[in-house]
Structures are given as C-alpha cells and as structure tokens.
C-alpha cells in the first residue's frame, strides 16, 4: 500500500476515513485540531460525503457522533484533553447507552501544558466510563489502531477512547495505509430502548457494562497491543505506556535483553501479563506520560512484595512530559541534557500579532479601568488571554471555557463593581451563552466584552459558529438593545471606544460590548486567496 509522511493527527484522520467513517465531529483544540482539518481537506472525504463540520463545543460533538452511531454509521470525535471535561456528561453516559455504529473518541493530552491550562490524563476517563482505551506508541500504530478501535466499538457496542499526546500528534513518520472500507448502511438499534436512560433501563445497562468491562482485560485485540518480553535474571522490570516506549528504547536499544519489559498500548491491561512481569523482578519501574495511573494500581496491589518506582516516589518527575534524558536518569544512566540553547533561539513570551484587534480592545480598556481600580477583569481561553501580559497586565482570571462570564457574575454578586468579562466569539458560542443567560436573568452589573475576530484564532483560524450571529444571540437571550453596543477596535477609534466602555461600565446592570474586527491573520490569508483566485481567472 502507499506510504505517506503524516503527523500523528493526520494518521488518525486518514485511518478513520479508510475505516469507513460517515461523520467527523470536533471543536478546535491543540494538539487535536489537525485531525478535523485533515478530514475537511480530504478529497476522499468529499467523494464519500463524510460529514465534517466543526461543532459548537466538545459536548455537542460527542452527542452528534452518538446520534450518527445510533443510525448505525461510524463516527470519529476529536478534542484536546480539557475538551473531554466539557464532553464528559455525554461521553460517560454513552458507555451506559452503548453504541450501534462504531464510535471512537480521540483525546489529545498535553503534558507539560504547551498550550493548555492543565495536563490531565484522559486514561482516567476511560476507567471512569469503563470503556476500552487505546494509546499508540507511534504514527503507524495510531493508523492501524483506529481500525481496531472501530472493530472493538462494534464488537462490544461501546465507545472507544483513543488517547494520544502532543509529541505523537505533532511529529511525522512514514505510514503505510490499508484498503479502504465502505461506510456502514443505516441500521437502527435492535434494542429500541437502548438509548433511553430512564433509571430502570440505565440500571440494567450499567450492570451489563460492569460485566463487559471485566472481559475487556483478556480481549485478544487489546492483549495483542500489550507486549511482554523477558530479560535476564530478576533485576528491574519496566512497564511503559504508549509513546514512553520510544523514550526507553532510545536508552536501552543495545541492552534491552537486560530488562523484563511490558509495553502497554491498550487498557484495561491483562492482570496476568502484569503478574508474569512482576514475578520475574525485584522492582518495577513504570514509565507513563501523564498521571501515575498504572503505577497507582500496582502500588495498591504490590507494595508489600515488589518495589514500585515511578512518578509517585520521585524516580520520575511528578509533572511534565517524559523524554529520553528523564528515562535515562530513572534507569540510573548518565542523562544527556544537550548543549545550552543560544539566547537568540530561547523561548520568548507570546504576544499579540501586529495589528491584532484584541490589542486595541485592551489598550482602550486599560485606560478606562485606571478610573475604577485593578482586579476587575475576568478573561477566557483564547488569544485575548495574552492581555494578562505586559504592557496591558489587565487579565485577572483564565480558568476554563466560558468562565469569564460566570466569574464576573459571581464577583458582582459579591459586591465587586464594575466587573468586566472578556471573551472571544468562538468561546462565547462554546460555553459563554449560558453564563450570559444567568447575567440577563439577574441583570448583573457586569460589562461583557465579546472580542469578535470572526474565527477561532488561537488554534489557527477555524470557523467560528458565532460569525454574524452574536447580536441576534445576545438579543435572543434577553440583553437590552440599548446596552448592546458595537465598537470597531482600531487606533483611530481609540477615544470613541473608551467613551463607550466608560459609559457601559458606569451602567448599574448588564451590558454587552461587541468589539468586532477580523483576525489579522485570517484577513491576510483571505486576501492572498482572493488575489490568487483573481490571477487564476485573469480578472
């Protein structure tokens, strides 16, 4: 079959197309974004009429995919790890309802928080929901595993969680493809009550789920991805999870037979394999990206008999990504740190793009807020969070998607006035609308600034569900037309924008200021595309 040089994200997307998906659902979030972008740009997806529109948030994405599964077809969902928090209600209950067509949920974790507010481990959600979890070691395995993930999903009638991390998502390797599979035909569930989680039904299905979860431990597909190899003597045994296997191999390629090794890529693991490894060792080192999930399970069972090393005892750092040097140190080897990075290429703090509309919003807001005092601006997840940095130093919170609105409401309930919330257009439709409804109902003395750049800018300029809809959404939620103001964040409008901000901050009630200006990056790309099209047509 043809070989392609693919990112891990792209390998997953191509595999899903080849495995016969009928729908792809996602909300942009690094490091998962490229999965949907690949599907959207794929001629194969166009030919096969695969649904591939962005969803408003991760919860709606999972629910729509579950609806496609209900109709008997295969669906893929993709998000970053914190997106799985948003989707948790639908995801966990989908394990109780079960699925009809295959359903695979990809969660891209971000250890070391390269572009995230935490580094949680999605494998926890797999255990919580009691569903199979697959965690590939490399891009080829990611491609191959997607086929098995859909097979597992349809075999056990369960969603499958597919966990990757930043390094796998955003590194490239040669991937050999397979022959494409046709899409499923529409087929309604054989059990008409399967998706109706009334308590009497849910209790019965939950009981069946707990039984099925135990059988997963010895499933041949899952066990086939977990590899046990014997070493010499007793000594140290090593358990690796997913991509950590590669970091280990960089250190022990020439003497791997000295170690007993269990390489995990599927969960729940077969306890017999774990017992066999442990029976050959005096101590076990666990190398896993993220939380000490396997290590914690081993300690609960084996602390009295076998010494367990890993993140919990400090052998491996408790936080951050693994790398070959960390693994070398855990094995007692000399760790190669590498040369010092020259100052010219050292990491610099991020900043707004030149000409960014968010910068003009903060420039005006900073001057007006001087009149009211510090500590009153609640922000959200997006490019505009950079307002926390110099020279603006304006942002006092950034917790999760949509929290700017509700934290400002809570602060105003406590008596803080004025309370200001800053949110982007895409984040507003993701999670901000419900908070605004709370503010409308209470007429909270909050000034909400929706910094609308008509795109999901932080993740590269994907479509925003809010484009050309924000005024009607706000009015529909009950915002007073007299206190729904529109400004254009440009330097030439600086004094005028300050006047609008000052006026609404003094209003003893809810006001919404829509600061509308297209993202400078997407505007530039659109202009280049326009010019190229004109040149092509000879206009």
Image (cartoon, rainbow, N blue to C red):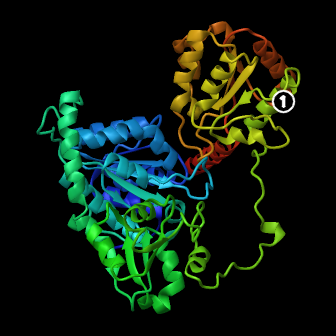
**What residue is at 22 percent from the left and 46 percent from the top?**
209
Residue 373 is left or right of residue 528, and the answer is right
Q: Position of residue 169 (x, y in %)?
A: 50, 61
- x, y (%) of residue 33? 51, 51
Q: Horizontally, is 536 left or right of 486 in the view?
A: left
Q: Residue at x 25, y 50 (%)?
A: 102
Image point 79% across, 34% down: which residue? 394
The picture quadrant where one finds residue 436 is top right
| Side of 46 relative to 334 (left or right) | left
Q: Quadrant of residue 437?
A: top right
Q: In the figure, is residue 378 to the left or right of 49? A: right
Task: Answer above or below: position of 374 versus 272.
Answer: above
Q: Quadrant of the N terminus?
A: bottom left
Image coordinates of residue 535 in percent, x first then y, are 61, 50
The residue lying furthest to the front in this view is 304
Q: Nearer the viewer, residue 304 or 284?
A: 304
Q: Where 15 sits versus 415, above or below?
A: below
Residue at x 60%, y 60% (from the top left corner): 319
Q: Is residue 508 visible?
A: yes
How packed mark 1 is, by other alpha carbons closer than 10 Å (few <14, some 14-19, many 20 or more), is: some
Q: Is residue 419 above or below residue 358?
A: above
| Residue 49 point in image, percent of width and height | 31, 46
Q: Secondary structure at mark 1?
A: helix
- Any part of residue 466 in sight: no
> Most extreme residue toward the left, as rendered?
190
Q: Quadrant of residue 186?
A: top left
436, 182: nearer the viewer: 436
Please state, as top left, top right, bottom left or bottom right, where the C terminus lies in the image: top right
Q: Which residue is mark 1?
A: 366
Count how many numbered circles sit on residues in the image: 1
Relative depth, front residue between 99 and 144: 99
């Amino acid at each position: 079959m043809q070989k392609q040089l693919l990112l891990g994200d792209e390998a997953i997307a191509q595999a899903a197309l080849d495995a016969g998906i009928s729908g792809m659902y996602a909300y942009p979030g690094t490091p998962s974004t490229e999965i949907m972008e690949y599907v959207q740009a794929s001629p194969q997806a166009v030919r096969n009429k695969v649904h591939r529109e962005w969803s408003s948030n991760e919860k709606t994405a999972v629910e729509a995919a579950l609806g496609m599964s209900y109709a008997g077809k295969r669906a893929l969902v993709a998000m970053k790890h914190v997106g799985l928090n948003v989707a948790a209600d639908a995801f966990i209950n989908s394990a109780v309802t079960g699925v009809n067509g295959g359903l695979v949920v990809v969660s891209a974790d971000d250890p070391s928080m390269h572009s995230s507010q935490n580094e949680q481990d999605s494998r926890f959600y797999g255990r919580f929901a009691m569903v199979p979890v697959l965690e590939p070691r490399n891009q080829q395995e990611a491609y191959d595993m997607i086929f098995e993930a859909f097979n597992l999903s349809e075999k056990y009638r369960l969603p499958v969680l597919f966990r990757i991390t930043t390094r796998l998502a955003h590194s490239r390797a040669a991937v050999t493809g397979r022959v494409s599979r046709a899409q499923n035909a529409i087929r309604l569930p054989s059990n008409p009550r399967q998706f109706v989680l009334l308590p009497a039904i849910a209790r019965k299905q939950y009981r069946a789920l707990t039984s099925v979860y135990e059988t997963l431990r010895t499933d041949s597909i899952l066990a086939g991805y977990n590899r046990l190899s014997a070493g010499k003597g007793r000594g140290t045994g090593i358990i690796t999870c997913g991509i950590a296997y590669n970091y280990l191999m960089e250190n022990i390629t020439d003497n791997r037979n000295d170690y007993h090794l269990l390489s995990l890529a599927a969960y729940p693991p077969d306890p017999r394999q774990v017992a066999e490894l442990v029976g050959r060792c005096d101590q076990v080192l666990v190398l896993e990206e993220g939380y000490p999930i396997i290590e914690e399970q081993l300690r609960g069972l084996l602390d009295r008999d076998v010494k367990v090393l890993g993140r919990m005892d400090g052998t491996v750092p408790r936080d951050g990504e693994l790398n070959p040097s960390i693994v070398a140190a855990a094995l007692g080897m000399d760790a190669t740190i590498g040369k010092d990075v020259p100052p010219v290429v050292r990491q610099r703090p991020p900043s707004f793009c030149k000409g960014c509309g968010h910068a003009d919003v903060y420039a005006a807001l900073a001057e007006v807020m001087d009149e009211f005092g510090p500590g009153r601006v609640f922000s959200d997840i997006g490019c505009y969070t950079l307002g926390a940095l110099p020279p603006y130093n304006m942002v006092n919170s950034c917790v999760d998607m949509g929290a700017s609105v509700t934290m400002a409401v809570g602060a105003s309930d406590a008596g803080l006035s004025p309370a200001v919330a800053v949110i982007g257009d895409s984040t507003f439709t993701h999670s901000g609308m419900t908070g605004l409804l709370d503010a409308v109902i209470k007429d909270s003395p909050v000034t909400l600034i929706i910094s609308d750049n008509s795109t999901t800018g932080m993740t590269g300029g994907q479509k925003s569900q809010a484009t050309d809809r924000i005024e009607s959404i706000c009015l529909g939620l009950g915002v007073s037309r007299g206190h729904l103001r529109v400004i254009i964040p440009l330097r030439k409008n600086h004094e005028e924008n300050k006047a609008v901000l000052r006026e609404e901050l003094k209003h003893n009630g809810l006001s919404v200021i829509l600061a509308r200006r297209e993202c400078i990056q997407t505007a530039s790309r659109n202009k280049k595309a326009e010019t190229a099209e004109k040149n092509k047509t000879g206009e």
